[in-house]
Amino acid sequence: MNNSNGITFTEEDRLLVIAPHPDDESLGAGGLIQRAVAAGAELNVLFITDGDNNPWPQRYLEFRWNLSREDRLRWGRRRRMEAIDALIKLGAPPDCADFLSLPDQGLTKILLEDSGQLIDPLSTTIQNWQPTLVVAPCIEDVHPDHCAIHVMLQHVLQGMGPLAPRALFYKIHGNGIPVVAPRVVLTLTKQEQLAKRKAILAHETQMALSKKRFLQYASPGEAYYQETGDSTPEAFHSAIGNGDELILRMHPYVVLRQRANILFAWEDEDGAFQSAAISLRQSQIIQTPTGPEIHVQPPDLPTDRRVYVKYQLKRIYFEQYGWQTLRMLSPTGNPRANGKPASMAV
């Protein structure tokens, strides 16, 4: 795979596309899938959920308000078939799709309570299939399923060390705040744009309420982001450890709500994935001239490993912010002296 002038594939390449729901494969990587298939590269598309907890389009199309469990399962089966149809329109073989059928809208809960449900199949797929490129959701995507996948995938990739494949990340749902990470843009031909448009339209259940927005993704450029390890300017701009207290410095535009939570995810000294949630009701909030500060009693966070943090403020489908890496400063306000760059998370 040649990375000097965009993204190209050879017959030796193996592309793994991770899609939180049926339609994300077309929206986020429809052009990349076509490019890989045309080059003869192997393709595996791993759908994490069936998109079954998608009530508003289902209510609209089926003219019913109350949805039973069987209604949702039937909807998920329909969305699976749409995903396979979309892959065929992208030129991909239908047997390249695998479905984990994890709970739609439930991946943050899995991250906090039983991360092995996703970490184990991600690890098994990557170890057994050995992709040369993994494409997955961006850390800042404000759909909670998307950014939760990113955090758990990074745990898998970091555990592989130098044997980890290259990874690029796509962003479907944003809050208007620009992503800092470098962009890699795949320029699509007119034919590739048309095929991507057809693939998006194949997700008929999503067209009733989101057609105009979704078709905007069939643009000439398909953008991807690279993980840099740097903290990104989402909800938190830095943190200070002060004894047993952690002071989280917020950007001034962040609107704090008592119903919000602060989520943490990290790898412990044994390499195991850990997570914790702290309610704002259990925290002290102090307003400062540079923005609010949240004073919390943190879990036992490592000082030499990356920590992910999220300001979790639930909306209907999306949240106000995705995850981000935590930029730690010393109590003097300087980067913590741990042998890492100033922007390295701990």
Image (cartoon, rainbow, N blue to C red):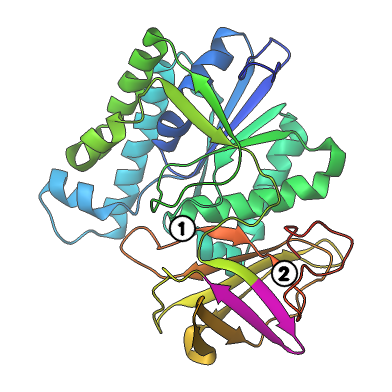
Q: Dot 1: within a 10 Å radius of its alpha carbon, few (fewer than 14), some, or many (20 or more) residues?
A: many
Q: Secondary structure at mark 1?
A: helix
Mark before the other along the chain sequence, 1 or 2: 1
Closer to the camera in the image, 237 or 226: 237
Q: What residue range appears in magenta? A: 239-250
| Residue 204 in the image: above or below residue 177 | above
What's under tag 2, amino acid-wise? Met
Answer whether residue 243 is magenta in the image: yes
Closer to the camera in the image, 101 or 224: 224
Determine which of the numbered discs, if any, sits on residue 104 in the image.
none
Answer whether residue 52 is magenta in the image: no
| Residue at image location 64% in from the left, 81% down from the top | 247
Q: Which residue is mark 2?
A: 328
Q: Which residue is mark 1?
A: 144
| Residue 151 in the image: above or below residue 129 | below
Q: Residue furthest front?
A: 289
| Residue at image location 61% in from the left, 37% down from the top | 182
Q: Secondary structure at mark 2?
A: strand
Q: Dot 2: within a 10 Å radius of its alpha carbon, few (fewer than 14), some, or many (20 or more) residues?
A: many
Q: Position of residue 146 (x, y in %)?
A: 49, 50
Closer to the camera in the image, 320 or 336: 336
Residue 53 can be seen in this image: yes
User: Which quarter of the picture shows residue 332?
Assistant: bottom right
What secondary structure do most residues of the magenta stretch adopt? strand
Of badges 1 and 2, nearer the viewer stands 2
Q: Position of residue 107 (x, y in %)?
A: 51, 58
Determine whether, in the image, residue 7 is placed left or right of residue 83: right
What's under tag 1, amino acid-wise? Pro
User: Which quarter of the picture shows residue 15?
Assistant: top right
